[in-house]
Image (tube, rainbow, N blue to C red):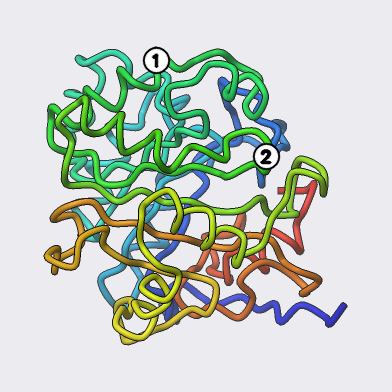
Amino acid sequence: MKPINYYELKPEENHFDDVVIDVTHRCNMQCKNCYIPNREIPDMDANRMIEAISKFPKKTTIRIIGAEPTMRKDLPELITRIKQVPHRMTLLTNGLRLARLNYVQTLKNAGLRNLYLSMNGVDNDDWYEEIDELRCAEKKIQAMQNSAKLNILRDIGCIIVWGVNNDAPKRFIKLLKNNNIDNVCLRFKTIGQIGRHMGIEFQMGMDDLINLVSKQFGVSADYIKSWQKKWKFPGGKKEDDTFYFPLSEKSTRVYKGIWIKLTNWNNDGKETVLSNSRRRGRLTEDFKVAPFFEHVTENEGGY
Protein backbone atom coordinates (compact mmCIF):
# COMPACT_ATOMS: atom_id res chain seq x y z
CA MET A 1 0.00 0.00 0.00
CA LYS A 2 1.02 3.60 -0.58
CA PRO A 3 1.76 5.74 2.49
CA ILE A 4 -1.21 7.80 3.67
CA ASN A 5 -1.10 11.48 2.73
CA TYR A 6 -1.85 12.61 6.28
CA TYR A 7 -1.65 16.19 7.47
CA GLU A 8 -3.18 18.49 10.08
CA LEU A 9 -4.28 22.10 9.82
CA LYS A 10 -4.82 24.77 12.43
CA PRO A 11 -8.54 25.63 12.64
CA GLU A 12 -7.94 29.00 10.98
CA GLU A 13 -6.36 27.15 8.01
CA ASN A 14 -9.29 24.78 7.46
CA HIS A 15 -10.07 24.29 3.77
CA PHE A 16 -12.64 21.48 4.14
CA ASP A 17 -16.28 22.15 3.28
CA ASP A 18 -17.53 19.43 5.65
CA VAL A 19 -15.96 18.76 9.04
CA VAL A 20 -16.94 15.70 11.07
CA ILE A 21 -16.88 16.09 14.85
CA ASP A 22 -17.00 12.94 16.97
CA VAL A 23 -18.50 14.51 20.08
CA THR A 24 -18.54 11.19 21.93
CA HIS A 25 -17.21 7.65 21.57
CA ARG A 26 -20.06 6.27 23.67
CA CYS A 27 -22.85 4.37 21.94
CA ASN A 28 -26.08 2.51 22.72
CA MET A 29 -25.47 -0.02 19.93
CA GLN A 30 -22.74 -2.51 18.99
CA CYS A 31 -22.92 -2.50 15.20
CA LYS A 32 -20.69 -4.89 13.30
CA ASN A 33 -19.54 -2.06 11.01
CA CYS A 34 -18.23 0.89 13.02
CA TYR A 35 -15.34 3.17 12.11
CA ILE A 36 -14.72 4.20 15.74
CA PRO A 37 -15.33 1.13 17.96
CA ASN A 38 -13.12 2.42 20.80
CA ARG A 39 -15.47 3.33 23.67
CA GLU A 40 -12.81 4.45 26.16
CA ILE A 41 -12.25 7.95 24.76
CA PRO A 42 -13.70 10.80 26.90
CA ASP A 43 -16.35 13.05 25.38
CA MET A 44 -15.00 15.98 23.40
CA ASP A 45 -14.70 19.19 25.41
CA ALA A 46 -17.54 21.45 24.24
CA ASN A 47 -15.79 24.76 24.92
CA ARG A 48 -12.63 23.80 23.06
CA MET A 49 -14.70 22.46 20.18
CA ILE A 50 -16.61 25.72 19.82
CA GLU A 51 -13.37 27.69 20.12
CA ALA A 52 -11.82 25.65 17.30
CA ILE A 53 -14.70 25.85 14.83
CA SER A 54 -15.11 29.57 15.57
CA LYS A 55 -11.72 30.04 13.92
CA PHE A 56 -12.71 28.41 10.63
CA PRO A 57 -12.14 30.95 7.83
CA LYS A 58 -15.41 30.15 6.04
CA LYS A 59 -18.89 28.88 6.75
CA THR A 60 -18.63 25.12 7.05
CA THR A 61 -20.99 22.16 7.30
CA ILE A 62 -20.43 20.63 10.73
CA ARG A 63 -21.38 16.98 10.94
CA ILE A 64 -22.08 16.03 14.54
CA ILE A 65 -21.53 12.33 14.92
CA GLY A 66 -20.20 9.83 17.44
CA ALA A 67 -20.24 6.84 17.92
CA GLU A 68 -23.72 8.10 18.96
CA PRO A 69 -24.09 11.85 19.66
CA THR A 70 -27.44 11.51 21.46
CA MET A 71 -25.53 9.87 24.33
CA ARG A 72 -24.51 13.40 25.34
CA LYS A 73 -27.01 15.11 27.64
CA ASP A 74 -25.77 18.49 26.43
CA LEU A 75 -26.44 17.74 22.75
CA PRO A 76 -29.19 20.40 22.46
CA GLU A 77 -26.80 22.99 23.89
CA LEU A 78 -24.06 21.90 21.47
CA ILE A 79 -26.46 22.31 18.55
CA THR A 80 -27.39 25.82 19.64
CA ARG A 81 -23.77 26.86 20.15
CA ILE A 82 -22.69 25.56 16.73
CA LYS A 83 -25.55 27.39 15.05
CA GLN A 84 -24.51 30.59 16.82
CA VAL A 85 -20.96 30.50 15.41
CA PRO A 86 -22.62 30.33 12.77
CA HIS A 87 -22.04 27.19 10.73
CA ARG A 88 -24.36 24.85 8.88
CA MET A 89 -24.95 21.69 10.88
CA THR A 90 -26.34 18.20 10.50
CA LEU A 91 -26.75 15.45 13.08
CA LEU A 92 -25.85 11.83 12.23
CA THR A 93 -27.56 9.36 14.55
CA ASN A 94 -28.70 5.76 14.91
CA GLY A 95 -32.06 7.22 15.91
CA LEU A 96 -32.89 5.07 18.92
CA ARG A 97 -33.47 8.08 21.16
CA LEU A 98 -35.34 9.88 18.41
CA ALA A 99 -38.14 7.37 18.81
CA ARG A 100 -39.44 9.86 21.41
CA LEU A 101 -41.12 12.79 19.69
CA ASN A 102 -40.50 15.19 22.59
CA TYR A 103 -36.75 14.57 22.34
CA VAL A 104 -36.78 15.29 18.59
CA GLN A 105 -38.73 18.47 19.32
CA THR A 106 -36.07 19.46 21.87
CA LEU A 107 -33.36 19.07 19.23
CA LYS A 108 -35.34 21.11 16.73
CA ASN A 109 -35.98 23.83 19.31
CA ALA A 110 -32.21 23.94 19.87
CA GLY A 111 -31.71 24.73 16.19
CA LEU A 112 -31.45 21.35 14.45
CA ARG A 113 -32.64 21.55 10.85
CA ASN A 114 -30.86 18.64 9.14
CA LEU A 115 -30.81 15.02 10.24
CA TYR A 116 -29.04 11.92 8.88
CA LEU A 117 -30.66 8.73 10.17
CA SER A 118 -28.93 5.35 9.94
CA MET A 119 -31.29 2.53 8.92
CA ASN A 120 -29.19 -0.43 7.77
CA GLY A 121 -32.09 -2.84 8.19
CA VAL A 122 -34.82 -0.60 6.75
CA ASP A 123 -37.92 -2.14 8.41
CA ASN A 124 -36.56 -5.68 8.82
CA ASP A 125 -35.50 -6.78 12.31
CA ASP A 126 -33.65 -9.81 10.96
CA TRP A 127 -31.42 -7.47 8.94
CA TYR A 128 -30.81 -5.21 11.92
CA GLU A 129 -29.87 -8.18 14.08
CA GLU A 130 -27.42 -9.49 11.45
CA ILE A 131 -25.78 -6.11 10.74
CA ASP A 132 -26.24 -4.06 13.92
CA GLU A 133 -26.81 -6.83 16.50
CA LEU A 134 -30.06 -5.29 17.70
CA ARG A 135 -33.69 -5.82 16.72
CA CYS A 136 -34.61 -2.16 16.51
CA ALA A 137 -36.79 -1.71 13.42
CA GLU A 138 -39.73 -0.30 15.38
CA LYS A 139 -37.63 2.41 17.02
CA LYS A 140 -35.86 3.26 13.76
CA ILE A 141 -39.16 3.69 11.92
CA GLN A 142 -40.55 5.79 14.76
CA ALA A 143 -37.45 8.01 14.61
CA MET A 144 -37.94 8.39 10.86
CA GLN A 145 -41.59 9.32 11.33
CA ASN A 146 -40.83 11.80 14.13
CA SER A 147 -38.06 13.58 12.27
CA ALA A 148 -40.13 13.73 9.08
CA LYS A 149 -43.10 15.09 11.04
CA LEU A 150 -40.92 17.90 12.38
CA ASN A 151 -39.37 18.50 8.94
CA ILE A 152 -35.75 17.79 9.87
CA LEU A 153 -35.25 14.45 8.09
CA ARG A 154 -32.88 15.03 5.17
CA ASP A 155 -30.86 11.84 4.73
CA ILE A 156 -31.32 8.15 5.47
CA GLY A 157 -28.14 6.07 5.41
CA CYS A 158 -27.79 2.36 4.74
CA ILE A 159 -24.74 0.10 4.46
CA ILE A 160 -25.37 -2.59 1.87
CA VAL A 161 -24.12 -5.91 3.26
CA TRP A 162 -23.86 -8.44 0.46
CA GLY A 163 -26.13 -11.44 1.02
CA VAL A 164 -28.05 -9.80 3.86
CA ASN A 165 -29.90 -6.59 2.92
CA ASN A 166 -29.50 -6.60 -0.87
CA ASP A 167 -33.17 -5.66 -1.25
CA ALA A 168 -32.86 -2.55 0.93
CA PRO A 169 -33.18 0.00 -1.93
CA LYS A 170 -36.60 -1.14 -3.18
CA ARG A 171 -37.75 -1.79 0.39
CA PHE A 172 -36.94 1.83 1.28
CA ILE A 173 -39.11 3.13 -1.57
CA LYS A 174 -42.08 1.19 -0.22
CA LEU A 175 -41.37 2.38 3.34
CA LEU A 176 -41.16 6.03 2.29
CA LYS A 177 -44.35 5.75 0.23
CA ASN A 178 -46.24 4.18 3.11
CA ASN A 179 -45.16 7.06 5.36
CA ASN A 180 -45.78 9.85 2.82
CA ILE A 181 -42.11 10.88 2.84
CA ASP A 182 -41.18 12.21 -0.58
CA ASN A 183 -38.36 14.75 -0.07
CA VAL A 184 -35.29 12.90 1.18
CA CYS A 185 -31.95 11.52 0.08
CA LEU A 186 -31.30 7.79 0.45
CA ARG A 187 -27.60 7.17 0.94
CA PHE A 188 -26.24 3.71 0.21
CA LYS A 189 -22.63 2.75 0.81
CA THR A 190 -20.45 -0.32 0.80
CA ILE A 191 -18.66 -1.68 3.86
CA GLY A 192 -15.46 0.19 4.71
CA GLN A 193 -12.42 -1.71 5.93
CA ILE A 194 -11.82 0.65 8.84
CA GLY A 195 -12.47 0.16 12.53
CA ARG A 196 -14.69 -2.87 13.16
CA HIS A 197 -16.23 -4.34 10.03
CA MET A 198 -17.75 -7.49 8.58
CA GLY A 199 -15.68 -9.90 6.50
CA ILE A 200 -14.82 -9.93 2.82
CA GLU A 201 -17.73 -12.25 1.99
CA PHE A 202 -20.15 -9.41 2.87
CA GLN A 203 -18.35 -6.71 0.89
CA MET A 204 -18.92 -5.31 -2.58
CA GLY A 205 -17.52 -2.59 -4.84
CA MET A 206 -19.00 0.45 -6.55
CA ASP A 207 -19.93 -1.37 -9.78
CA ASP A 208 -21.82 -3.95 -7.71
CA LEU A 209 -23.62 -1.18 -5.84
CA ILE A 210 -24.58 0.67 -9.04
CA ASN A 211 -25.90 -2.51 -10.65
CA LEU A 212 -27.88 -3.43 -7.54
CA VAL A 213 -29.68 -0.10 -7.19
CA SER A 214 -30.19 0.37 -10.94
CA LYS A 215 -32.18 -2.87 -11.13
CA GLN A 216 -34.27 -2.12 -8.06
CA PHE A 217 -35.01 1.49 -9.00
CA GLY A 218 -35.60 0.76 -12.67
CA VAL A 219 -32.97 3.19 -13.92
CA SER A 220 -29.97 2.37 -16.08
CA ALA A 221 -26.38 2.30 -14.87
CA ASP A 222 -25.64 4.85 -17.60
CA TYR A 223 -28.25 7.21 -16.10
CA ILE A 224 -26.62 6.91 -12.67
CA LYS A 225 -23.13 7.49 -14.06
CA SER A 226 -24.24 10.44 -16.16
CA TRP A 227 -25.03 12.38 -13.00
CA GLN A 228 -21.43 12.24 -11.87
CA LYS A 229 -20.70 14.78 -14.62
CA LYS A 230 -23.72 16.92 -13.71
CA TRP A 231 -23.39 16.96 -9.93
CA LYS A 232 -20.70 18.86 -8.05
CA PHE A 233 -20.30 19.40 -4.34
CA PRO A 234 -19.83 22.94 -2.94
CA GLY A 235 -16.73 24.57 -4.35
CA GLY A 236 -17.04 22.59 -7.59
CA LYS A 237 -15.51 19.47 -6.01
CA LYS A 238 -16.08 16.05 -7.56
CA GLU A 239 -15.47 12.56 -6.15
CA ASP A 240 -14.78 9.47 -8.22
CA ASP A 241 -16.33 7.13 -5.65
CA THR A 242 -19.58 9.08 -5.17
CA PHE A 243 -22.70 9.14 -7.36
CA TYR A 244 -25.59 11.52 -6.63
CA PHE A 245 -28.77 11.38 -8.70
CA PRO A 246 -32.58 11.86 -8.52
CA LEU A 247 -34.92 8.96 -9.12
CA SER A 248 -36.86 11.28 -11.41
CA GLU A 249 -35.19 13.70 -13.80
CA LYS A 250 -37.98 16.13 -12.92
CA SER A 251 -36.27 16.61 -9.53
CA THR A 252 -33.85 19.45 -10.16
CA ARG A 253 -32.98 20.26 -6.54
CA VAL A 254 -31.60 17.96 -3.85
CA TYR A 255 -34.23 17.06 -1.22
CA LYS A 256 -37.00 17.95 -3.67
CA GLY A 257 -38.16 14.45 -4.51
CA ILE A 258 -36.23 11.24 -3.79
CA TRP A 259 -32.50 11.53 -4.39
CA ILE A 260 -29.97 8.73 -4.16
CA LYS A 261 -26.33 8.93 -3.11
CA LEU A 262 -23.96 6.00 -3.66
CA THR A 263 -20.57 5.96 -1.99
CA ASN A 264 -17.90 3.28 -2.11
CA TRP A 265 -16.30 2.85 1.31
CA ASN A 266 -14.50 -0.29 0.13
CA ASN A 267 -10.87 0.84 -0.22
CA ASP A 268 -10.23 -1.71 -3.00
CA GLY A 269 -6.56 -2.04 -2.00
CA LYS A 270 -5.97 1.72 -1.70
CA GLU A 271 -4.24 3.18 1.32
CA THR A 272 -7.56 4.28 2.80
CA VAL A 273 -11.16 5.03 1.89
CA LEU A 274 -11.81 8.05 -0.37
CA SER A 275 -8.25 9.25 0.09
CA ASN A 276 -7.11 12.79 -0.69
CA SER A 277 -10.56 14.29 -0.28
CA ARG A 278 -10.44 18.04 0.21
CA ARG A 279 -14.14 18.09 1.08
CA ARG A 280 -14.29 15.85 4.15
CA GLY A 281 -12.34 16.88 7.24
CA ARG A 282 -12.35 15.76 10.87
CA LEU A 283 -11.76 17.70 14.05
CA THR A 284 -8.93 15.87 15.78
CA GLU A 285 -8.59 15.05 19.46
CA ASP A 286 -6.21 18.01 19.85
CA PHE A 287 -8.60 20.38 18.02
CA LYS A 288 -6.85 20.61 14.70
CA VAL A 289 -8.41 19.63 11.36
CA ALA A 290 -7.29 16.62 9.30
CA PRO A 291 -8.65 14.81 6.23
CA PHE A 292 -11.40 12.55 7.55
CA PHE A 293 -10.49 9.10 6.28
CA GLU A 294 -6.75 9.61 6.66
CA HIS A 295 -7.25 10.58 10.30
CA VAL A 296 -9.51 7.59 10.98
CA THR A 297 -6.98 5.22 9.37
CA GLU A 298 -3.95 6.76 11.10
CA ASN A 299 -5.67 6.57 14.51
CA GLU A 300 -7.40 3.23 14.10
CA GLY A 301 -7.94 1.66 17.51
CA GLY A 302 -6.70 4.78 19.27
CA TYR A 303 -9.32 7.44 18.64
As rendered, which of 76 and 251 lies closer to the eye?
251
Helix, strand or loop at mark 2: loop
In the displayed structure, 57 sits above or below 80; it is below
Q: Residue 283's x, y, as percent?
A: 52, 60
**How many residues crowd mark 1 within 10 Å: few (<14), some (14–19), many (20+)?**
some
The Cα atoms of the two marked residues, 2 and 1, are separated by 20 Å
The number of numbered badges drawn on the structure is 2
**How many residues crowd mark 2 within 10 Å: few (<14), some (14–19), many (20+)?**
many
User: Going 49% across and 42% down the picture, which residue do you hit?
Assistant: 158
According to the picture, the residue beneath numbered tag 1 turns out to be 139
Q: Image quarter for residue 270?
A: bottom right
Q: Image quarter for residue 274?
A: bottom right
Q: Residue 61's x, y, as percent?
A: 32, 62
User: Going 18% across and 35% down the picture, which residue do you hit?
Assistant: 181
Mark 1 or mark 2, which is nearer the start of the sequence? 2
Q: Residue furthest right?
A: 1
Q: Which mark is residue 238?
A: none
In the displayed structure, 173 sits above or below 275; it is above
User: Going 55% across and 67% down the picture, which residue do you hit?
Assistant: 288
In the displayed structure, 67 sits above or below 267; it is above
CB under 8 Å between discs 2 and 1: no
In the displayed structure, 63 sits above or below 291; it is above
Amino acid type of the residue tagged 1 in the rendering = Lys
81 relative position to 272: left or right: left
According to the picture, the residue beneath numbered tag 2 turns out to be 33
Q: Residue 216's x, y, as percent?
A: 43, 48
86 relative position to 298: left or right: left
Amino acid type of the residue tagged 2 in the rendering = Asn
User: Going 13% across and 69% down the picture, which residue do you hit?
Assistant: 252
